[in-house]
Structures are given as structure tokens and as C-alpha cells.
Image (spheres, rainbow, N blue to C red):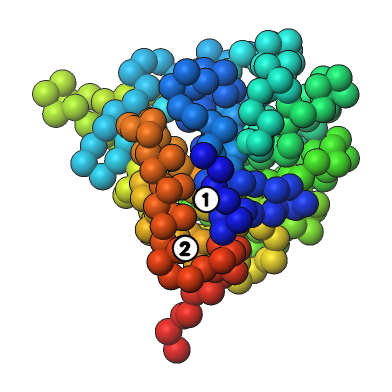
Amino acid sequence: MNAGAPLRTVVNKLEFQNPLVLAAGTAGYGQELAGVMRLDRLGGFVTKAVSLEPRAGAPAPRVAEFEGGMLNAVGLANPGLDAVRRDQVPWLAEHLPATRKIANVVGFEVEEYAAVIAGLEQSLAAHARALDAFELNVSCPNVKAGGMEFGADPKSLASVIAGARASTRRPLFVKLSPTLADIGESARVAVDAGADGISVVNTVPGLVVDVERRRPALGFGSGGVSGPAILPIGVLATWRVRQAVRVPILGVGGVASATDALQYIIAGASLVGIGTAAMRDPRAPERIVRDLERWCAAHGVADIQELSGTLEWPR
């Protein structure tokens, strides 16, 4: 199924067949879901994290469900740059030609982000179709700044993006946390430093308690809240970022239906990410795409991009 003209979305000169993408951490590197979900029916997907060195991640259990969604502490587990270059980049280059592929990049020192992107770019010289863009997860702790998140320190945030910008000509999205004091100002800092787009939001810190054991449900203790509970948080962050900057926005958090996706788009998003809902039901992304098509047809919308940022704020 091709989403057709109404859902076609162009972001930073990249054409997406529809605005729906799988959020970071929910699609692996694509190959893991090849037999589970029709990734070629989506606009794109964001890979799980890529760090300079391999990471074992957080102890099990890593996921706990609760009534409002899901709590997870994966700990950015990934095989590291060298393994991704060897095993994942060639596969990505050969598959999913109509689906945009965005690499999620993490680091624990300013220089690591640029090093990961530079390493991936070396592989892309021989596998140019493997990746279309990068997403910088700046919610990671900066070990040289006492563990403060890169996104919470304007100077560190700008340095990360400037280094990444110098390492690639591909579009850079910067993923911001909803806990930032002024997410609009952080978005301005990111764009001024060279970001081509903003992803909002990352998960919200939370805790689920196993009352029988009187212990946290997760092996790490606390984790990140995702799912329906954070939908209004993500939509508000999208609107605030849209007021601050005029670059494309990838709205993420709590999307489980076409109505949810439309809320993000009307608030200012160009692309919409789905994560927890797709993990619960791998058919959910395709259903949302179909429902978006139907909604556009029923409302006479010939180009879904025209809806972006049309929210009318009350006086």
C-alpha cells in the first residue's frame, strides 16, 4: 500500500511517503522487525541508539506496564558503532528503499556524538542509501559535567550539535526532554547551533512499584514513562517548540491512533513518531496510516502538510 499524495511529507528535502515513523528504540535497526511489521508502509523509522562503544544496558526487568502506559529502563543498550557499521548499515542500504531511515545517536561526552556520526558516514560512502538523517539524543548524562543532561546545558547542547554538524551534511534532528525548564529556548539553541529539526518528546522519569515485593518493578529502579500518559505532554511541547523555531518537528509520545497523530500535526509537527503502541500491536502503525488517509478524504485535505501548525490558540 502506498500512502498516496495526501500523506506525502517533505522534510529537509527528504520525501516521506507518509508522516508516521517508528520512534527510536522500538524498531531495532529495522532488520529485527522485518518479519513482524511492514516497515515499507511507513514514512520511516528511527533506529535504536548507536553509541561509540557497546553498552550492556540496564538490568532486567527493563519494562513494566501500568494503566497509563509503559515504564522502561533499557539503558541505551546497543552493540556499539563498529558492530552497527559491520552488521546493520549494509542491510539498511539494501532494504526499504521507500522508507526513510534515521539513526539515533547517543554520547556521554561532547565529542562522542561527532565520533559516532563520522564513523557512520565512513560506512555510508559505500552504502549511501542506508541512512537519511541522524537524531541526537541529548538527554544523555554528560560525564564531564557531573552527569547533567546535554540538553539542559545550553553550552554543552550547542557544542554537541556543532560537532555533529561538522561531521555530516545529512539532516540533524535533536531530541529534547519534556523536563527542560524552557523547551522552546532549548530548541532555539539547537537550531542556532546547526540542527535541522527537533524531536519532542523523550520519555518522562517515573517509578512503578511492585507492592507485593515493595521494590521497583524495574531492575534499574526508575525509568522513562511512555504511552498514552505522555500524549498531552508531547503535544504541548510540540506547540511550544513550533512557537520558538521554524524547523521541522518530529512529535513523539503516546500516539496510538490517527486522532493522536493529528493532534501533533495540528500543534506543529511535520512527522509523528509511534513507539509503545507499535510494541503492543505491530499492526497499529499501518492502521494509523489508513485512518489518516480516511480522515483526510473525509475532511477534504489534499495535503496533510497544510495542517501542520494550524492550531488556533484561545485568546
In the image, 27: left or right of 93? left
Q: Earlier in the sequence, mark 1 or mark 2?
A: 1
Q: Disc 1 and disc 2: Cα gap in Å?
A: 16 Å
* Mark sitting on residue 272: 1
Is residue 116 shown to the viewer in this render?
no
- Foreground disc of the pair 1, 2: 2
- The image shows residue 290 at horizontal and vertical percentages of 43, 48
The amino acid beneath tag 2 is: Cys
Residue in front for this viewpoint, 308 or 63:
308
Drawn side of residue 204 relative to residue 243, left or right: left
Q: Residue at x 73, y 31 (%)?
A: 131
Residue 40 vs 258, above or below: the answer is above
Q: Is residue 213 left or right of 260 when viewed as pictured?
A: left
Visible residue check, residue 110: yes
Residue 280 lies, in percent from the top left, at: 33, 32
Residue at the disc numbered 2: 296
The amino acid on which the numbered mark 1 sits, given as a three-letter code, is Val
Which residue is situated farthest in the left direction here? 212
Q: Is residue 284 above or below residue 96?
A: below
Q: Residue at 66% across / 36% down in the picture?
A: 98
